[in-house]
Image: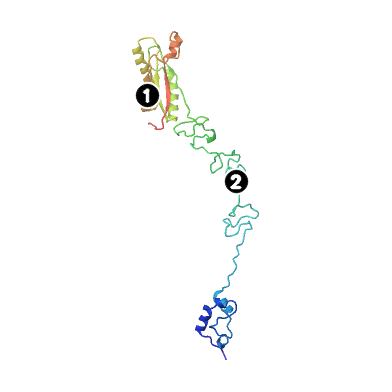
Amino acid sequence: MKKVISISSIIILMLSFNACSNGVLPPEIETDKPEYKYLSPVAIEESLFKKAVAPVIDDDNDKDGVINSVDRCPNTPPKSKVNLIGCTILADDDKDGVANKDDKCPDTKMGIRVDYKGCELDSDDDGVVDSQDRCPNTSKDFVVDGYGCPQTATLKVNFAFGKSDINQNLIDDLQTFALFLKQNRGYNLIIYGYTDDIGQEGSNQKLSLDRANAVKEVLTRYGISAKKMTTIGKGETGAIGNNKTKDGRAQNRRIKVELIQSYQNIK
């Protein structure tokens, strides 16, 4: 004859399981009753609360020593040296952060900042690398020398006694100087005129300014903006030669130019 277990009996048994975990049923359950004859508290616990869980296996498919769940480069070639995330560590002989295979400048000195090609940076893009650049923030309005600094130029113009007109022999020099200014648009120009000490001081002051303006006019004809040039007459002052000699006075009848760096390009 089959035994029938009531639902209320099962509930009572579940609630009292902790008390019977040592194998002894609580007194309210009479084990001599027929409906409890075949019950086992342990069997009920396992069937109601335990589930079989398959073990998790985290393999290393590419055999690089980094498990799959961490490996960002899961198909690393065999015997490759990898980092902590399983990606190949590429050789970088000069230690500049650019792998040998991509390094166009493979012998960069230690500590030198490089670009993506592994070559030293030229931050102001003037053609001189940073480690050799003595003027590191040069404007593109200048042509630089081998040290990364703006090139300079001078202009030598001398005048006949009492004259301010430009000798035809000086035209080539002025044209060359104008070309320099066009290539170095960041320069403004001050033109100083001078005389010797022969004559009246007031007349020499005017003559010196006329000489400066004559040079300015010629440079303007060669395409240099008049706004970029300032003229100043210095008269008899600033002598570079001995005014007591003919040669000295000839040296003093001149103009001098001063280049001023300006980052506001005036056209």
Please tell me whether mark 2 sits on a helix, a strand or a loop: helix
Q: Which residue is drawn at 36% across and 27% down?
A: 227
The residue at the point 55 percent across, 87 percent down is 35
Local secondary structure at mark 1: strand
Q: Position of residue 134 (x, y in %)?
A: 51, 31
Q: In this view, does 228 lie above or below 130?
A: above
Q: Quadrant of the N terminus?
A: bottom right
Distance of mark 1 from mark 2, alpha carbons? 56 Å
Q: Residue 152 carries which label?
A: none
User: Taking 25 as reference, is 100 above or below it?
Assistant: above
Q: Seen from this angle, which residue lies furthest front?
A: 27
Q: Splitting the image into 4 quarters, where does residue 116 fall?
A: top right
The residue labelled by disc 1 is: 230
> In the depicted view, which residue is nearer to us: 150 or 21?
21
The crowd level at tag 2 (other Cα within 10 Å; few <14, some 14-19, many 20+) is few
Place of residue 104 in the rendered image (x, y in percent of width and height, measured from the top left) = 58, 41
Q: Which of the colour schemes (rainbow, by chain, secondary structure, one colour) is used?
A: rainbow
Instruction: Looking at the picture, tell me which residue is in the foreground, 75 or 49.
Output: 49
- Label 2 sits on what residue type? Lys
Q: Name the kind of residue labelled 1 in the image.
A: Thr
Q: Quadrant of residue 78?
A: bottom right
Query: Based on the displayed image, in which of its 4 quarters is residue 63 positioned?
Result: bottom right
Is residue 129 in view? no
